[in-house]
Image: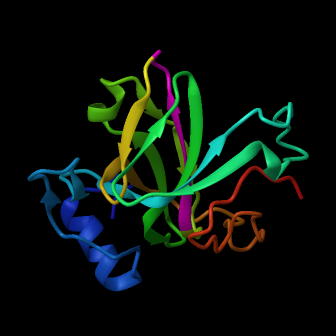
């Protein structure tokens, strides 16, 4: 097999053989929703219903080396969350990923949200990483922005590569086996 971007058939094979995405939807769900599921060259993941909203009520600063959880307010929603203007939230993916030793992913935001001023931070998903992604979502507009729970938020593009000398699992990466609880920045 050649290295490069995986198509829908290759993604589906890896889901069947390696349990790479769970739950897995083998087609794009688009009606009355922001799309999610298998696309031709990627998989559109959904955002869950729990969010951590950044706040400055304690006059804190954000320090990725010494993250203060008091900078966040947890909100669980039924339908959507309103992200304040020029603000930022963390959320968790609905799908659990189980990356094989020769597959990496790149998470990119969906254009539906980008056209409304909402960005999902581009992030890598390293080979042999497992868990529920914590997603970083920013509202770059001057108006509150809706993000719909349990609907599409970003696409994971999968790449086949040669197995590296040390996988994320082998180096015991700090975000390995993340559960659905949102994981803020940490340094070990």
Quarter of the image that includes the N terminus:
bottom left
Residue 183, given in percent of the width and then of the height, sits at: 68, 59
Dominant secondary structure of the magenta stretch? strand
Residue 39, given in percent of the width and then of the height, sits at: 20, 54
- Highlighted magenta segment, given as a residue range: 132-142
**Residue at coordinates 86% horizontally, 53% vertically from top-left?**
187
Left or right side of 184 for 101? left
Tally the numbered discs: 0
Magenta stretch: residue 55 in it? no
Magenta stretch: residue 135 in it? yes
> Extreme top residue here?
142
Residue 67, given in percent of the width and then of the height, sits at: 84, 47
**Residue at coordinates 80% horizontally, 52% vertically from top-left?**
69
**Residue at coordinates 76% horizontally, 32% vertically from top-left?**
56
> Extreme left residue here?
31
Quarter of the image that includes the C terminus:
bottom right
Tell me the quarter of the picture where residue 10 sits: bottom left
Residue 158, given in percent of the width and then of the height, sits at: 39, 55
Residue 131 sits above or below residue 55 on the image: below
**Residue at coordinates 30% horizontally, 23% vertically from top-left?**
115
Residue 55 sits above or below residue 6 on the image: above
């Amino acid at each position: 097999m050649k290295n490069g971007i995986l198509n829908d058939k290759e993604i589906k094979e890896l889901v069947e053989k390696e349990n790479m995405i769970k739950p897995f939807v083998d087609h794009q769900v688009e009606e009355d929703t922001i799309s999610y599921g298998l696309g031709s060259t990627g998989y559109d993941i959904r955002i869950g219903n729990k969010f951590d909203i950044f706040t400055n009520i304690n006059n804190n600063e954000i320090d990725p080396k010494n993250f203060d959880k008091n900078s966040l307010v947890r909100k669980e929603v039924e339908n959507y969350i309103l992200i304040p203007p020029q603000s930022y939230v963390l959320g968790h993916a609905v799908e659990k990923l189980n990356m094989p030793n020769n597959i990496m992913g790149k998470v990119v935001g969906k254009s539906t949200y980008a056209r409304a001023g909402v960005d999902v931070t581009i992030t890598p998903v390293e080979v042999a990483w497992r868990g529920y992604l914590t997603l970083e979502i920013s509202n770059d507009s001057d108006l509150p922005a809706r993000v719909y729970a349990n609907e599409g938020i970003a696409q994971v593009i999968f790449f086949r590569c040669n197995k590296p000398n040390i996988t994320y699992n082998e180096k015991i990466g700090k975000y390995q086996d993340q559960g659905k609880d949102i994981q803020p920045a940490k340094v070990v």
